Amino acid sequence: MREITLTDLADIARGAAILGTGGGGDPYIGRLLATAAIRADGPVPLVPLADLDDDAVVLPVAMMGAPTVMVEKLPSAEQVGLAARTLAGYLGKELTHIACAEAGGVNSLIPVVAAAQLGLPLVDADGMGRAFPELQMVLPTLYGIRATPMSIADEKGNRGILDTVDNHWAERLARSATIDMGCSAMISNYAMSGAQAREALVPGTLSLCAELGALVRAAREAHVDPVSRVVDRLGGRRLFSGKVVDVARRTVTGFARGEARLSGMDGDTGAELVLRFQNEHLVAERDGVVEASVPDLICTLERESGEAVTTEGLRYGQRVTVIAAPADPRWHTPEGLALAGPRYFGYDIDPIGVAG
């Protein structure tokens, strides 16, 4: 895939929602925005991470806030462009590339909108290899790349620049501003050189999203199990199949926090799985025993269709299969675990990876 066209968007959105581990925003919203942008401005060139020149100027663009709010408070394409243009103007640099901050339903496609509007290529990479709830939780943080200066913009046209002492303070202050902006805002941060991007980003993310989406679509057309195809491609494992029997969800400090309870079906009959989330799924407990945890991916898929179910989309009665897949190995270093491991989120456990 050397450019992203209208025909690619459905597969990218479907695959991004899987990698988003329940968060990253509604993929349908991202697809709508990207469709409008490509219709207006044409296909977006997709550049392999390895092809970036050392002196390239790479700018990630994303949506920040609670996914439950994003469903009702839709962003505009103009808001996306405003965030990118605001930071570019502040930096006084000529941008060469747009990038994805994370792999998530909306946040894998928001950068497509920015790239189309600005007439720039998009880097086939992202900052996580999945989605995480807080903006300092990206691999560039491990490489000493600053989150700020960063821009933030809302749908009313309000915008601002933050310049903080470290990336944790960037999260704290940007979260406060996002809450004042209605719990969702557009941001642009982690401006980096091509050399920094090659070192710090996860390569091939958008291509993987498109591949996963195509695998699910082809499996359905062939009447075979799409969940198995996803598990095999990601090198993961099935955790649980069951019916959603309870969801407790609330928006707190700009996040969608809560838990979902699943009653087992088929081989899992008689068992219960609890998913605990903060925008994204963090921990999966089977009958009180932790089966998987961050930083590895915990993904909830519809049993029959293989479509990802986001945390804001979980509903009573849904029949789902929960899978786990390995994260980028850098998340399992001591520095990565300190940034986004289970103890950071308040769970006093060692990380439980895909291998158990």
Image (cartoon, grey):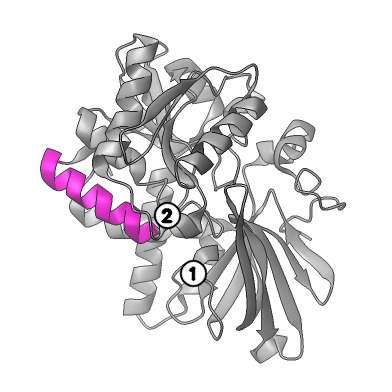
Magenta residues, dominant SS class = helix
Q: Using the rendered view, name the quadrant where residue 28 is placed.
A: bottom left
Percent of width and height locating residue 59: 40, 25
Looking at the image, residue 4 sits to the left or right of residue 230; the answer is left
108 up-or-down from 81: above or below: below
* Residue at the (52%, 31%) spot, across then down: 201
Which amino acid, mark 1? Gly
Foreground of the two, 11 or 340: 340
Q: Position of residue 318 (x, y in %)?
A: 53, 82
Q: Is residue 308 magenta?
A: no
Name, please, the residue furthest toward the right.
348
Q: CA distance from mark 1 to mark 2?
A: 12 Å
Left or right of 82, for residue 195:
right
Residue labelled with disc 1: 313
Q: Which structural element holds mark 1?
A: helix
**Looking at the image, is 190 positioned above or below residue 334?**
above
Q: Is 39 contained in the magenta span?
A: yes
- What's the magenta region? 27-42
